[in-house]
Structure formats: C-alpha cells, structure tokens
Image: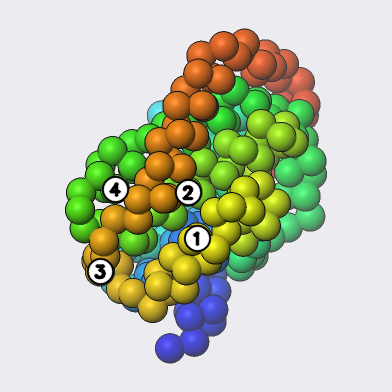
Amino acid sequence: MDINRTIQQKLDEIEQKENIKILHCVESGSRAWGFASPDSDYDVRFIYAHNKDYYLSLRPQKDYIDWELNETLDINGWDITKALKLFHKSNATVFEWSNSPVVYRTTDIWDNVKTVSNNYFSVKSTMYHYYGTASSNYHQYLTDEFVKYKKYFYVLRPLLCCKWIEKYKTAPPVLFDELFETVLESSLKDEVSKLVAKKVKMNEGDKGERIEVINEYIVKNLGHYKELLGAMQDDRTGDWDKIDDIFKKIIM
C-alpha cells in the first residue's frame, strides 16, 4: 500500500462529502514524534473550514469530523472555529498539529494562522498539559517490574517538552530527537539512546524490565515541575482581536 497516496485520496473524499476545505493536515502521535513501532497506525489530523453560510446559521453545528478508524488509519479533524478557540487557550494538542514535521496537506492561510497563534502561547498552560501527561502515563504504565518500553516515550517526551518550555518559553518541537539533542541532560543520553534502539524494533505491546535510572530521572523531574507549576502565575492572554481577524479572513 502507498500510504501517502491513500491518505491523499481520503482527504479528497472528506472534502467532497463534507463540503469543506482542509486548511492543514498532518501526522500526529508516534510517527510525528519519530519513534513509531513497526505496527504503529497513522494518526492523520486535519483542520478544516466550511463556507461562510455554515457559520451564519443559528443551528447547533458540529465542530469535528471522525472519518476513519482501523488498524492502519486513524483520521479525524477539527473545524477552524474549534482550532482557533483552542489556540486562544494555548492548547498543546493544536500547537503540536500546527508544528508537526509530517505534513500531508497545507495552505497559505494556515501559515497566517500559525503566525497569529504564537501570540496565544502560554508557558504555564502548555507546561501543565505536558506535566499532566507525563505524570499520568508514568503512574499508570511504568511502575511495574516489566513495562511497555513504548510508554517510556509517552513520559520522557512530555517531560522534555516541559524542559523546552522552561528554557525557551515557546512551543516545543514535535520530534523527539530535537528535544533529545537540545534539552536532555548528557548524563542520560546513552540510556535513552539504547531505549530508542530497542523501542523501534518492538511491537506496541512488547515489554521489558523497568529501567531504574530512567525511572529515577522521571520521578525527580515530575517533582520539579509540580513545584514549579504551583508557583507560576497564569500567563494566558484574554485578547481575541488577532484570532478573530484571522477567522474572518478564512471565511470571507
């Protein structure tokens, strides 16, 4: 199967049947992060817009499309109204979709959306998302004697995102390798490199012995970010003007 061709055909089908315009479509999840397993599916995510009349109706309107879910493809998307409101809240997921290194389709207007979205990035809100993800996955998956090595990356990556945000005050890169090279302490790089080498050869459900040095690193950093976040002030902006303006340009 030519997966890229299949995805493009699916996107064409979605546009035609839903009467929408896809503004931006990317890979999300482990394939975008750079540590997919051999049997990982494709998490295809898109942002779309309807014509202007759709947004002028008083009827309740759905702001998402769940298109396909099977062993190979997981395809769904958000309406531009939902995406822009989430940018306004500094939602980490929509920033990740915007910054994904695997882009299946995009538009010039999305470049403008991406530029405007930077005005709404919140250090505390976004860091809190990654801290919560790391903490939840650690306690749920990495405390037993034998663990799924895949789950280490669902903890390490959000922790490194916290480190990036703490250092640079910007949305973190999506690729794990970039986080690894930039913000992971050199003392842990050998252990994590070994873990990466094992992970890419393992299927989703495969397990191995818990890696104590990495677990200790995780626990230490979870404590640090819990304390840091507790002392932070809310830095989200209440301004809607820039994001309203870009919405009007999209639907005109």
Q: Percent position (x, y) of residue 118?
A: 75, 35
Of the numbered discs 3 and 4, the one sitting upstream in the chain is 4
Dot 1: few (<14), some (14–19), or many (≥20) neighbours within 10 Å?
Answer: some
Say what amino acid the circle numbered 1 marks: Val
Q: Relative to 100, does residue 95 appear above or below in the rendering?
A: above
Say which element carries label 2: helix
Q: Which corner quadrant of the image does residue 94 belong to?
A: top right
Left or right of 15? Residue 102 is right
Residue picked out by circle 3: 206
Q: Are marks 1 and 2 in contact (CB under 8 Å)?
A: yes
According to the picture, the residue beneath numbered tag 2 turns out to be 156
Query: Which one is in front, 18 or 234?
Result: 234
Number of numbered discs: 4
Q: Amino acid at mark 4?
A: Leu
Q: Give coordinates of residue 195: x percent, y percent.
A: 44, 65
Residue designated by label 4 = 142
Q: Quadrant of the N terminus?
A: bottom left
Report the residue at 79% width, 55% height from top. Answer: 108
CA–CA distance between discs 3 and 4?
13 Å
Q: Secondary structure at mark 1?
A: helix
Residue situated furthest left in the rendering: 145
Q: Earlier in the sequence, mark 1 or mark 2?
A: 2
Q: Is residue 127 visible?
A: yes
